[in-house]
Image: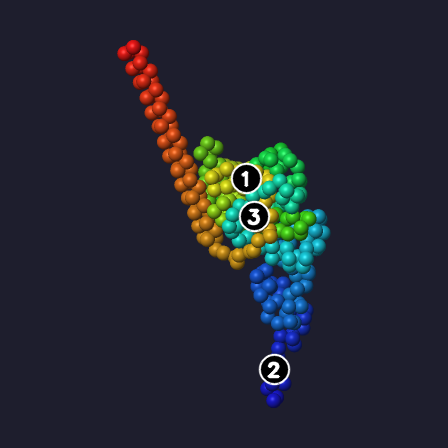
Amino acid sequence: MATESLATTIEDVHPDMLTRALRHLDGPALAAASCANVHLRSLASQTDLWCDLCLATWPALHHPRLLRLLSFFPNSYRSFFSDAFPSPSPLTVVPPVAGDDEASLPSELISAVDLRHRGSSILSRVLETDTSTAWFRGAHFRLDALDPKDSSLPTLPAAATPEDLTLNWIFIDPQQRRAVRATSQRPVAIDRHWITGETLVRFATVLGDGCAIGVVATCVEDTGQVREVSLTAECVDGVCLSGRDGLAVLRAAMEGSRRREEAEEAERSRWEEFSGLRMRRKEALSRREQMVDLACAAVAAAGFLALFAVTVFR
């Protein structure tokens, strides 16, 4: 009996000490701690814990408008974290957009962009995009985190390697109060521009066989400057989606389920499969075009020979 009376439970620890310990956890660990018991759930559900965690994970959220907006999410910053931290599940099909369905598309998108190198911030920016215009919905779905007119461009540290870059591009729908992480955090491919020699660091999320959302960071090797950070949505045929179709894909991704955090090798593997499928489709289309060209040439040659024969034997 004496042993039982001296037993210490988690409830006996002072709440301030537990709260301080919870501040050292990352998002998944903090969510798991809230499932342990009622006492930890009440402590791990504190808004300031999730606020500090979100601001540390995505520095771009320090923007005044986002600080106000995220507090109005269903469960404040915890809801935002559950939307933005895990990757979206693949879509079975790319959702088509009918004329009557355009009203349900986001009329505005806010992008929180954070580019880092080994934890050091390279670029932290918030983009506010009006997506309700006919121009945006009819043009290609493309967003640029850097303005070409900027006099100063972000620069990588000396001896920085592209493989150590990490990117978070979070899309936020301010009307529906939903968010989604648009791309992988680690590069899925690193290439070199065949003309300029610039390094192209690609981040991408494959949303099924239908499409992928990708960001390409263009780095100048000599100066280390990041000249361009652009996001596009592409179908499997390599064609950039229109703004209307890109919004439909983002809406479906926001409303869809999330998958657990996966290793970067898995994201790179899905991108390689997507790229391979796109390459095979291009090769098949090229072969069909060659067959059509050969058929046209054969018909033209037959017509010429027929005309020649009529002319000679007339």
The image position of residue 113, as x and y in percent, is 60, 46
Amino acid type for the residue under numbered disc 2: Ala
- What residue did someone put label 1 on? 241
Is residue 154 visible in the rendered structure shown here? no
Q: Amino acid at mark 1?
A: Leu
Circle 1 or circle 2, nearest the eye: 1
Q: CA distance from mark 1 to mark 2?
A: 62 Å
Q: Which mark is residue 7?
A: 2
Q: Residues within 10 Å of mark 3 (few under 14, many from 20)?
A: many
- Of residue 295 and residue 286, the one placed in the foreground of this image is 295
Residue at the extreme bottom of the image, as rendered:
1
Q: Which mark is residue 233?
A: none
- Residue type indicated by callout 3: Ala
**Camera sees residue 73:** yes
Q: Residue at x 42, y 44 (%)?
A: 276
The CA distance from mark 1 to mark 3 is 15 Å
Identified at 59% across, 42% down, the residue is 97
The quarter of the rendered structure image containing the N terminus is: bottom right
Depth order, front residue of 302/18: 302
Which quadrant would residue 136 be assigned to in this image?
top right
Q: Earlier in the sequence, mark 1 or mark 2?
A: 2
- Give the x, y percent position of residue 54: 63, 55
Q: Are marks 1 and 2 in contact (CB under 8 Å)?
A: no
